[in-house]
Amino acid sequence: VIAQPAAPRWLLHPRHDPALGRDVARGLSAPEAIGNVLVHRGLRDLASARSFLEPTLADLHDPRSMRDLDRAATRLRAAGANGERVLVQGDYDVDGVTSAYLMASVLARLGARVHVRIPHRTRDGYGLTDAAVDEARRRACTLIVTVDCGVTAVGPIAKATALGIDAVVTDHHALGASLPDAAAVVNPHRTDCGYPFKSLAGVGVAFKLAQVLLDEGDDPFDFLDVVALGTIADVVPLVGENRVLARFGLERLSRTRRPGLRALMEATGLWGRPVTGGQVAFVLAPRLNAAGRMSSGEQALRLLMAREPDEARAVAESLEDDNDRRREHDERAALDAVARAERELRWPDCASIVLWSEEWHPGVLGIVAARMVERYHRPAVLIALDGDRGRGSGRSVAGVDLRALLEDCGDLLDTFGGHAFAAGLTVSRTRLPELRERFERLVAERVSPESRLPALTHDGTLALAACDLALCDWLERLAPHGLGNPEPVFVTSQARVDGTTVVGDGKHVRLRVSDSGGSAEAIGFGMGGEAATLPAGSPVQLAFHPMRHTWRDETRVQLRLRGIRRT
Ligand SMILES: [Mn+2]
């Protein structure tokens, strides 16, 4: 029997400052709730609040302030002018594929002859490898451009240089001990890089280069749809420049002229309306990732490159098939991992989750690890074994730097790489018990037991009467949401259930609720199970996000439930 995860504590946002929230709201002539949300998102004065609400493309930083960007641009222009053969090395996830597509398109426009290399998840290693350099030589390339990878490829780039092949690195990953000796290394994390915004995705870095390479005739902003895809899919914070790229990119995505993206949006029912960040994260990105998870990311690249609607539809369909297969593997591995976490680990006393299996598909480990973190609020590393070799993927919780943890386990691992929240590794089977023990000890040392309790951070109490369409308009201006800018969540004061309807085969619940000043309709997706315990008259407190809901030409406010508490 699998235990239900613990109900989260509800915590008022730690930056809550009602006096300041009121000031910001008054300055904007906005509802107080909006002022509070802005303060919680770190926007404590009117000027920054205004530019957050109304980002413009003029907010983008000068690309030339990025270290080595001019050198990279000069080398790429020469490649175009000379009609050089160029190998673009990407990665198999959405960020890596969109970056490669963007860079290849720009190089082709400049006049270069481009070959794109998207690695195979299990057959090829990560990033630029010696084999990739060999391929560049076989294809008579005189330049290698890396996107979303390359900053740690010291050996392969030295090899390229020895073969007379130049390299230009564009990347956003953490730096290694030394930089590769390349013609240019563009990465905002370089300690000598003065670029003011450090959290770009790989496709964001590639875009900065495109900004200086494309003149006004070839508007670089044409590519914002793919930039938004890669940025949102890579789960970088959607603040600052990323917010600008995502906001304008989503607008362009909604009316994209790329046949492949259009076909994918038609196939998933998203075409014809404004696309949200959530739809990119939960509908489009999983499909673009599915090919890379199940086999090779080449299909996602083909989708972006498709010129004809027929081809576009065929590729979109194959991505849908890959996504179905991905889902099967994903669900099977998740069930197994949950059962084993509660059987094999000293649950609930363990501080971390490290599990391995020969049955898991290596392509779904990251997704399943993310589910484990969501369920258990502990860093999780899942490893798929193939013979003596293990390939793992990990996810972490706020405040626990996964990459730092892996560094401290570095002597037990063959390879590792990644960020604070997500990382990958390879390890041999014999090391696994020791890895589990060391990882557990390190996490236990660094994490307080309270942080393991699930928490729902909310933006304050809101009366039901205040949940009107005007508030929804304001809330919409806070989108797109993601890391660094979560969707606002409010809580009711004491409320009462007036009526309960279970919908969607018992999966969801629709409630009529009222408090002392008003009433509202609420919908709880996936909360059908809780409905039976909520007869009319039940005293409750709700956590929710108010949304505009249109049905049969009638628009009204609907509260999207995030939690129900019986009081
Ligand atoms: Mn990336």
Image (tube, rainbow, N blue to C red):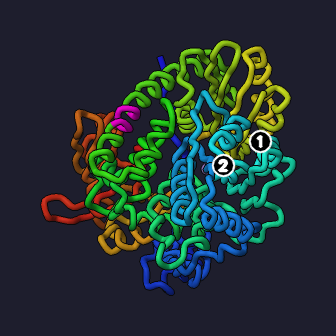
- The mark that comes first in sequence, 2 or 1, is 2
| Residue at x 72%, y 62% (from the top left corner) | 188
| Residue at x 67%, y 42% (from the top left corner) | 127
Where's residue 526, x and y in %? 35, 39
Callout 2: few (<14), some (14-19), or many (20+) C-alpha neighbours within 10 Å?
many
What kind of element bears circle 2? loop
| Residue at x 47%, y 46% (from the top left corner) | 301
Image position of 397 (left or right of 464): right
Which of the labelled discs sits on residue 156, or is there none?
Answer: 1
Which of the labelled discs sits on residue 432, or is there none?
Answer: none
Front-most of 319 and 409? 319
- Considering only vertical position in the picture, is 43 above or below 547? below
Image position of 526 (left or right of 519): right
Front-most of 444 and 400? 400
| Prevalent SS, magenta region | helix
| Residue at x 54%, y 71% (from the top left corner) | 38
Q: Which residue is mark 2?
A: 141
- Considering only vertical position in the picture, is 474 above or below 230? below
Image position of 461 (left or right of 389): left
Of the residues shown, which amino acid type is indicated by label 1? Pro
320 is within the stretch colored magenta: yes
Magenta segment: 318-323
